[in-house]
Image (cartoon, helix red, strand yellow):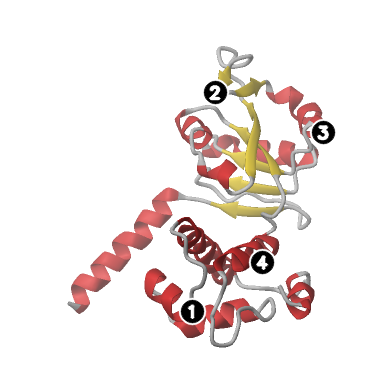
Amino acid sequence: MSESAEKNSSSAEPVSKAVVSRLSLYLRELQHLVRDGRETTSSSELGALLGVTDAQIRKDLANFGQFGYPGIGYRPDELIAAIKRILGTDQHWHAALVGAGNLGRALLGYKGFRQQGFRLVAVFDNDASKIGTRIEDVPVYPMDRLPEIARDHTIRLGIVAVPAAAAQEVADRLVQAGVEGILNFAPVTIRLPKTVQQVGVDLAIELEQLSFAVVRCGQSG
């Protein structure tokens, strides 16, 4: 990464969520190219693979500095390293999951977290039959041990996979335990201090967006 890229990637200027989402897509595609043995690529090729314009890719990357080489394009391994620094995934993150139900178990079984630098180190639940067991080799603890475990394992991220009625209380306890960012799968909006970041994942909303797109496509077709 160039000196200007390092400077811009560490700035606090706001960047839209859409740009950050596309950076993750670029990262995945670049990782595929590296696995295929590719040593160079271009914004045109990436755009064709992802369904976005090459101009959009260049604009997104320009938020963080200058990348690539004239007449060559991008070196995928170098751009992967740069995007990881931008996203903060050039370091390992310890995360805690609250909720060992069906959704929680599915999340624990997802191997992509570890591949991208995220390690689920603890599960918390109120079900006495689950406490003291291990799910996907991750220990399950009672909620009252959350502050202790979060401190001992330097847990900075929390995942909420509980029913909507319990989501706010769980989020509050994660904040009290020192968690800095929360991924919320409960179908409800949670209120957090401005110092704590959150991302909500509501699968029903995603399906509503998909059904809307299908209906609109049918109407226009």
Give whichever of discs 3 and 2 has the lower sequence position: 2
Query: Spatial distance from mark 2 to mark 4, Cα to Cα?
Result: 34 Å
Tell me what residue is drawn at x 74 percent, y 44 percent.
156
Give whichever of discs 4 and 1 has the lower sequence position: 1
Question: What's under tag 1, amino acid-wise?
Answer: Ser
**Which quadrant of the figure contains the C terminus?**
bottom left
Query: Spatial distance from mark 1 to mark 2, Cα to Cα?
Result: 42 Å
State the SS at label 4: helix
Question: What's under tag 4, amino acid-wise?
Answer: Ala
Q: Nearer the viewer, residue 213 or 7?
A: 7
Question: Is residue 116 placed above or below 132 in the rendered structure?
Answer: below
Query: Spatial distance from mark 3 to mark 4, Cα to Cα?
Result: 30 Å
Query: Spatial distance from mark 4 to mark 1, Cα to Cα?
Result: 15 Å
Q: Which residue is mark 2?
A: 135
Q: Which residue is mark 4?
A: 82
Q: Most extreme residue toward the left, as rendered? A: 221
Using a 10 Å C-alpha cutoff, classify the residue at mark 3 as few (fewer than 14 neighbours), some (14 to 19) or many (20 or more).
Answer: few
